[in-house]
Image (tube, helix red, strand yellow):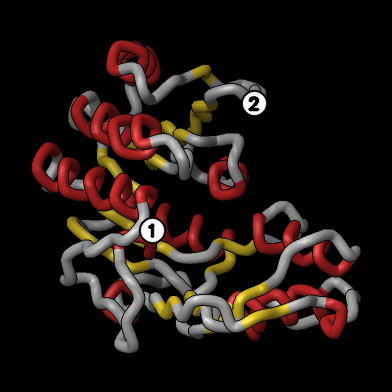
């Protein structure tokens, strides 16, 4: 397949570019990706022109900006509206939900409590109306192997004594970027439509995740400061999606082994 990957300069986008078996055209905004096309997803005309030029069979839309509604919400709508028959996989987030004790399953409707979560939820709603055959893939904290993910960088900063803390009450379901990329590509060529959950099977606090990253990287986990923080338990139940995937979504305690 000829694939267009938006947000190709990001952690997930870069991982998708390493994939064999597809012709992938990277789309970036400001950080140039060799062989890619510049794209401002906020501009409907720019999205239309790039898609008409690339003529992709599939699109994996990873582009977002947490503090920019136009990029996160309008950008996703522009891509869906101009997909022109291409198979669309939209990467959403566990931020579409608010904290609660029970995990969220794929059939549950968004209930965001943050502007970023509201933007992702608005994008989900619009995409389901514009492109009902699209895949909406909700995920959680994304962790890599090369130190470039946000969580890995935070560990290095705090271990070095820079200001900040980890919250023991902030619980998520971390996923490895390679598992996520593999699952998205599987979903792209599958018959699956609608909402999927692509997160790790293990719920961890951000503090416990930071400790695992520190141990893997040979840092002293005792140097990481922590406070309880406001309780924020948002867990994605990905078992329904895992049942249709060959890719195994590994727990963080496995993929972060030293």
On screen, residue 254 versus residue 99, left or right, reads right
Vertical comparison of 187 with 234: above or below: above
Residue 100 in picture, x, y percent from top left: 32, 82
Report the residue at 61% width, 76% height from top: 167
Separation of residues labelled 2 and 1 (CA atoms): 23 Å
Report the residue at 46% width, 20% height from top: 39
Q: Quadrant location of the C terminus?
A: bottom right
Counting residues from the start of the chain, the first of labels 2 and 1 encountered is 2
Task: Return the residue nearer the eye: 202 or 53.
Answer: 202
- Whether label 2 touches label 1, CB < 8 Å: no
Vertical comparison of 133 with 244: above or below: above
Around disc 2, counting alpha carbons within 10 Å, would you say few (fewer than 14), some (14 to 19), or many (20 or more)? few
Is disc 1 placed on a helix, strand or loop? strand
Q: Identify the residue position indicated by label 1 in the image.
A: 93
Residue 121 in picture, x, y percent from top left: 25, 52
Report the residue at 61% width, 43% height from top: 14
Residue 168 in picture, x, y percent from top left: 60, 83
Report the residue at 73% width, 80% height from top: 212
Task: Return the residue nearer the eye: 113 or 198.
Answer: 113
Q: Residue furthest bottom?
A: 101
Vertical comparison of 217 with 137: above or below: below
Quadrant hosting residue 69: top left
Q: Identify the residue position indicated by label 2 in the image.
A: 31
Q: Quadrant location of the N terminus?
A: top left
Around disc 1, counting alpha carbons within 10 Å, would you say few (fewer than 14), some (14 to 19), or many (20 or more)? many
């Amino acid at each position: 397949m000829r694939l267009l990957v938006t947000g190709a300069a990001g952690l997930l986008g870069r991982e998708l570019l390493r994939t064999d078996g597809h012709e992938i055209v990277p789309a970036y905004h400001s950080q140039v990706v060799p062989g890619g096309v510049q794209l401002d997803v906020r501009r409907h005309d720019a999205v239309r022109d790039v898609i008409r030029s690339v003529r992709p069979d599939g699109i994996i839309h990873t582009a977002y900006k947490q503090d920019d509604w136009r990029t996160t919400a309008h950008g996703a709508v522009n891509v869906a509206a101009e997909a022109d028959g291409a198979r669309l996989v939209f990467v959403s987030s566990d931020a579409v939900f608010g904290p609660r004790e029970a995990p969220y399953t794929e059939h549950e409707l968004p209930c965001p409590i943050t502007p970023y979560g509201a933007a992702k939820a608005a994008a989900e709603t619009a995409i389901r109306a514009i492109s009902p055959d699209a895949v909406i893939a909700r995920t959680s904290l994304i962790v890599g192997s090369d130190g470039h993910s946000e969580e890995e960088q935070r560990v290095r900063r705090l271990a070095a004594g820079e200001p900040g803390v980890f919250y023991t009450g902030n619980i998520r379901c971390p996923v490895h970027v390679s598992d996520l990329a593999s699952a998205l590509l599987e979903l792209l060529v599958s018959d699956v439509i609608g909402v999927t959950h692509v997160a790790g099977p293990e719920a961890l606090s951000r503090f416990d995740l930071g400790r695992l990253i520190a141990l893997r990287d040979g840092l002293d986990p005792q140097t990481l400061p922590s406070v309880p923080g406001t309780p924020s338990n948002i867990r994605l139940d990905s078992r329904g999606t895992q049942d249709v995937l060959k890719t195994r979504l590994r727990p963080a305690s496995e993929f972060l082994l030293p």
